[in-house]
Image (spheres, rainbow, N blue to C red):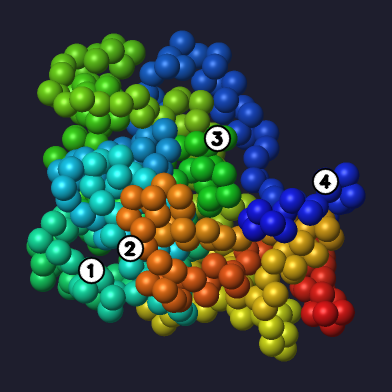
Amino acid sequence: MAESAQSNISSEMVKTKVQYDYGLGDEERRAILTVLQGDKFVGHEQKRKLEKEFCDYIGAKYTVALSSGTAGIHCSLLALGVQAGDEVITVANTHSTPAMCIMNAGAKPVLVDIDEETLNIDPRKIEEKITPRTKALMPVHSNGHPYDVDPVKEVAQKHGLRVIEDAAQSLGAKYRGKRLGTFGEVGIYSFARHKHVIAGGWGGIIVTNDEEIADIVRAFASQGRDGRYEEKGEYGVPMGLSGKVGYSYWLSEVNAAIARVQFRKFRTGSLRVEERRRNAERYNELLEGIPPVQTPIEKEWAYHSYCRYVVRAKDRDRLYTYLTKKGIYVAVHYYTPTYREPYYTERFGLTNESFPFTERASKEVLTLPSWPQLTEKQLVYVTNSIKKFYQSA
């Protein structure tokens, strides 16, 4: 979070009471040992099984598991032909990854301000950013709440643009009853820390209904080898060249095995979205009547998966410091919007005034503990601490 607030906190003086819980246990450990004790720990068996399970869940025809969600975004941009001189439109209020991946593909990230209610891209502001160089749209489903897909699709179809859905934070979320990831040409999910499903480090997966896109992503992720090489050679030995300059973006078998266990827990066990939604409902009840805190909304067309429970809070930085000293794990998403990142401002020089809602949100948003394993006692402790902060202010 806020660097200024975080620097004032001594880890020695804090007794952690609400620490992040990744939901890791004996099942994940057994899965790791099974891979390491086998003879194909550098193969693709776990990866292929994860891809099949994800296909079935999302309702997509093809998936490709990769070393990170970032790798998925990078490969997807390349698969859609994004290159130097192109522009890709994305949202101002998100992690630096989308803009960096666009720049790594040689293109220019063009930023759009947010809808103040959902903290997602404002579809009404996209069209004014389109130029003859615009190649694709890459909006983000933020925090577990989908962006408003239909108007984004309308703009894309009107201007002949491809759509990449960044759903890294929104596994389990739905737009008008349908899971995310297949409204555009390709969707990306992440298995990094603090996501719904983790891979014990980093991991990601792309979903698509376009076989050609899936094959091209596989090729870029596999050092330029034939996109289906693992099905053609013993132990995954590459059997053909795709003609592309690729990268080593494989998802390891160990990470795939961990992700499979976590994904099973996510679908039917302790990591279910319903647990996060239960916590969110309880937060809404406990925080009611505290005017300085604005709880997140859920639009009528959305099914929120609450990767993060993000409030808007008055005097946010001081509240962050106070809660952290109380031993409560909190964070800020995002303290530094993309247009204020040095790598961006040095090249494109945008001003804060260009994104008034993102700028306001960056000073107010606070992510409270929201993982499925939270207890009633912890939820009450967090909300009581917030009440005490404002009572003493």
Give the residue displayed 24% in from the left and 15% down from the top: 238
The answer to whether the residue labelled 4 contacts the one labelled 2, judged by CB atoms less than 8 Å apart, is no
SS for callout 1: helix
- Compared to residue 41, the image places residue 207 above or below, namely below
The answer to whether the residue labelled 3 contacts the one labelled 2, judged by CB atoms less than 8 Å apart, is no
Choose between 344 and 30: the one closer to the eye.
344
Image coordinates for residue 114, horizontal then vertical, percent: 40, 72
Image coordinates for residue 226, horizontal then vertical, percent: 18, 23
Residue matched to label 3: 201
Is there any visible trace of residue 281 in the rendered image?
no
Separation (CA) of disc 4 from disc 3: 24 Å
Name the N-terminal-most of marks 4 and 2: 4
Image coordinates for residue 383, horizontal then vertical, percent: 77, 73
Q: Which mark is residue 111?
A: 2
The answer to whether the residue labelled 1 contacts the one labelled 2, judged by CB atoms less than 8 Å apart, is yes
Choose between 117 and 372: the one closer to the eye.
117
Image coordinates for residue 341, horizontal then vertical, percent: 46, 53
Residue 28: name its quadrant. Answer: top right
The three-letter code of the residue at mark 2 reads Leu
- Compared to residue 128, the image places residue 86 above or below, namely above
Q: Which mark is residue 11?
A: 4
